[in-house]
Amino acid sequence: MGLIQRTIEQAGIPTISVTLSRGISRKIKPPRAIYTGFPLGHPVAFPHQHFRQLQLLRLMLNTLVTQITPGDIVVHKLVKDEDPEQACVLCQGIDS
């Protein structure tokens, strides 16, 4: 995935990947990667966890605009609260 990302980035389109293995991503060095700690087979949370999936999407978008150093793997700890108004700092002030 990192090779494809680099090609897309060279065309001026920013990319981000969700990684399930920090070790592999460290070797490949994609331009931007996010590690959430979800188990294999569930890169963006479990089925029907809409709050968690929305939270991850917002974290990814924030990482796209704030990560400056290419190749860094951002490790995000997602909150466990189910109330999007209380749980996600990035959600505050953003319309759903």
Image (spheres, grey):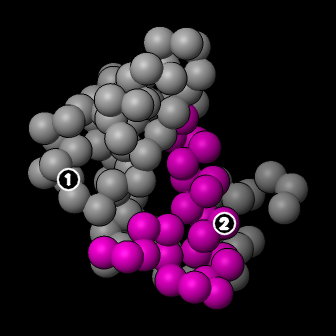
Region rendered in magenta: 40-64
Does the segment drawn in magenta span residue 17? no
Q: Position of residue 6 (x, y in %)?
A: 39, 23
Pick the front one: 2 or 74: 2
> What is the secondary structure assignment of the residue under circle 1?
helix
Residue sitting at x 64%, y 87%: 48
Query: In the image, 76: left or right of 92?
Result: left
What residue type is disc 2 on?
Leu
Q: Position of residue 65 (x, y in %)?
A: 57, 30
Q: Bin the neighbour count of mark 1 within 10 Å (Cα to Cα): few under 14, some 14-19, many 20 and up.
A: some
> What is the secondary structure assignment of the residue under circle 2?
helix
Query: In the image, 91: left or right of 59?
Result: right
Vertical position of residue 69 compared to residue 43: above or below: above
Residue on which the image places disc 1? 22
Pick the front one: 87 or 55: 55
Q: Quadrant of residue 39?
A: bottom left
What residue type is disc 1 on?
Arg
Split into 4 quadrants, where in the image is the N terminus?
Answer: top left
Vertical position of residue 59 compared to residue 77: above or below: above
Q: Position of residue 41 (x, y in %)?
A: 37, 76
State the mark number for residue 54.
Answer: 2
Residue sitting at x 61%, y 65%: 55
Residue sitting at x 50%, y 23%: 8
Q: Quadrant of residue 85?
A: bottom right
Q: Quadrant of residue 53?
A: bottom right
Vertical position of residue 37 compared to residue 6: above or below: below
